[in-house]
Amino acid sequence: MPLLKINSLGIEQAWALWQITETEEELSFASLESCPEEIVSRQKRLEWLAARVLIKSMLEDFGFHYYGLRKDEFGKPFLKEHPHQISLTHSYPYVAAQIDRLHPVGIDLEQPKEKLRTIAHRVFTPDEVSDAGNDLVKLCIYWCAKESLYKIYGKRNLLFTDHLRIMPFDLLHAGSFVGKIQLPEKETVVRLQYLVMADFVIVYTGIQIT
């Protein structure tokens, strides 16, 4: 099985990573689901199915039965028949997921690519660009962090530059930093964790501070 690891963060809290090596038929059998016909890309179909196999594996690790996924009015995935909050991300051939019984979560996985440099001024503040400097890996962590915060919020109409802020941090193989969802009516402060792998970086929710 290409489930690399389920990483426990507490009671019914975890994140996990899956590397896709299976065929669509194998993933469909494992998830007990079929990919929608409107998804035509082979990679997207594999990611769709692998995400469900991964969530199913995580729930079963907690001792629960998997009944499937649905999406709310904002496109945020949620579990049928369970109260747990979930977040999904993929960058072929990897799929990752996070689950938490009580709190909103956000996880994002990306492979550092040069296109991040060209869009940096549109999604990062000057302070964030300055802190990342010319380091593509650190820039990718910033991107994943903002995606994670966006998923935690779970609704639309957020501007990456105005509403999602990442505090400066030192780049290590693994570490943490603070992210903020800043809205006129409320500021939410979240501790985010990151991990740098050989060909991708991953950022996931740590502790929601406020």
Image: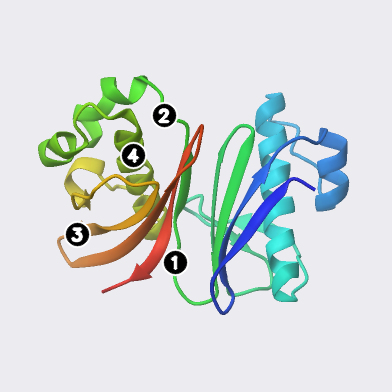
Name the amino acid, label 1: Pro
Which of the labelled discs sits on residue 104, or is there none? 1
Neighbor class of circle 2 (other Cα within 10 Å; few <14, some 14-19, many 20+) is some
Residue 85 appears in the figure = no
* Residue shown at 67% from the left, 58% from the top: 55
Residue 87 appears in the figure = yes
Q: Earlier in the sequence, mark 3 or mark 1?
A: 1
Which of the labelled discs sits on residue 183, or is there none? 3
112 vs 145, nearest the viewer: 112
Residue 4, position in %: x, y? Answer: 67, 50
Residue 36, position in %: x, y? Answer: 74, 38
Q: Give the labeled residue for mark 4.
A: 143
User: Disc 3 on helix, strand or loop?
Assistant: strand
Q: Earlier in the sequence, mark 2 or mark 1?
A: 1
84 vs 2, nearest the viewer: 2
Q: Quadrant of the C terminus?
A: bottom left
Query: In the picture shown, does residue 48 fall above or below 191?
Result: above
Query: In the picture shown, does residue 124 fall above or below 190?
Result: above
Badge 2 vs badge 1, beta-carbon distance below 8 Å = no
Q: CA distance from mark 2 to mark 3?
A: 29 Å
Q: CA distance from mark 2 to mark 4?
A: 10 Å
Q: Earlier in the sequence, mark 2 or mark 4?
A: 2
- Mark 2 or 1: in front is 2
Q: Give the labeled residue for mark 2.
A: 112
